Image (cartoon, grey):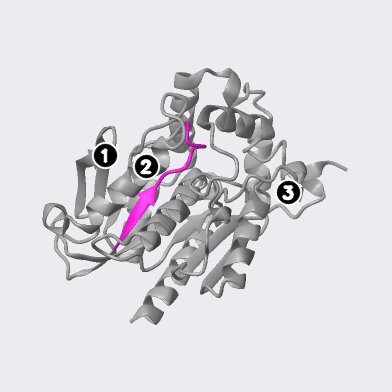
Amino acid sequence: MTEQTTHYVRPDVQAFLAFLNSTDAPPMSQLGLEAARASYIAMGQLAEAEPRALAVIRDLSCPGPAGEIPLRLYDLRETREAGPAVVFFHGGGFVIGDLESHHSLCTEIAAELDLPVIAVDYRLAPEHPFPAAPDDCEAAARWIAGNSTTLGREITGLIPMGDSAGGNLAIVVTQALMDQPAAAPVVMQVPIYPLSDDRPDHESFAQFAEGFLLTSDTMRWFADAYRAMTGHKRAYPIYSDHSTTPPTVLVTAGLDPIRDSGRVYGAELIRAGAEVVFLEMKGTIHGFTQLRKAIPSAQEDMQSIFKAVRLLLERLK
């Protein structure tokens, strides 16, 4: 019996994986850096849903520790009343991904939550290893919190959100801004299939090492490039104090090698008394947020995430 038949796999996920695994494409680590980055964008163009129409999609930048940080503002409305904004950090193992790779997803978030979304194009490894990514993301979040006039909307609170490496960065930025508050407070965080710790023995690592899109080889390649410090809370936020964690929507995927890293983070939040909505999307894979055309059920998963965010936002009033 194969690995893919020992776990529940949704029919549309099974079809996508069968196609993907039949191509005999070389692993990302063998493509070379620029080709790997280009292939990530290309896969999104094939597998991701079309971007949503919005009133505002505007590129801008903010000062960072090593120069200007590119940002992109998304908003369903041309103008709006004061309120919170999503600060979005893209995934890609800290090595690949940019504003373009997550453009459609950011339009979806802005359209469905009816909140401003500001995406952050942080520096990538291996050219810029740890802690360049969290340094840029924290700087961007602090700038967003204090620059409502430049953004053209009064931001009263931040919602750090991201997928995969971006989920890790959302947690790290939240922790930094809880420790040393910004001009606007963090009111919620939304890490989606995040890496939270550096344990090598999670069961999900072994269960889903091959054949489920994100492979053990790719994860090693990402880790070697990022060069994170073991046990450092800005690399692995499980090691931080969780007592001040704001309301959290935490999302994992059932067939994800880093699934258990998200689970243990959720357990720590609950032990610390944080308010958590935990959603594990059964039968689907790491990266589902960007595969909504290839995996139609992923659109329903996104709706579940949006409902959870709305629930916690309502409880904040």
Amino acid under label 2?
Asp
Left or right: residue 310 versus residue 208 is left
Considering only order in the chain, which callout, 1 or 3, is on the residue closer to the N terminus? 1
Q: Regarding mark 3 in the picture, which secondary structure is present there?
A: loop
Asked if the residue at tag 2 contacts the one at tag 3, i.e. Cβ–Cβ closer than 8 Å, the answer is: no
When the figure is inspected, residue 312 is found, relative to residue 176, above or below; the finding is below
Q: Is residue 292 visible?
A: no
When the figure is inspected, residue 142 is found, relative to residue 154, above or below; the finding is above
Residue under the point 28% across and 60% down:
182
The image's mark for residue 202 is 3
Q: Regarding mark 1 in the picture, which secondary structure is present there?
A: strand
Asked if the residue at tag 1 contacts the one at tag 2, i.e. Cβ–Cβ closer than 8 Å, the answer is: yes
User: What residue sits right under mark 1 in the picture?
Assistant: 64
C-alpha span from label 2 to label 1: 8 Å
Residue under the point 16% across and 54% down:
151
Residue 69 % position (x, y): 27, 38
Residue 201 % position (x, y): 75, 45
User: What residue sits right under mark 2 in the picture?
Assistant: 135
C-alpha span from label 3 to label 1: 35 Å
Considering only order in the chain, which callout, 1 or 2, is on the residue closer to the N terminus? 1
Amino acid under label 1?
Gly
Residue 37 % position (x, y): 45, 27
The verdict on residue 166 being magenta is: no
Image quarter hosting the N terminus: top right
Image quarter hosting the C terminus: bottom left
Magenta segment: 85-95
The image's mark for residue 1 is none
Q: Is residue 293 visible?
A: yes
Amino acid under label 3?
His
| Front residue of this view, candidates 38 and 185 | 185
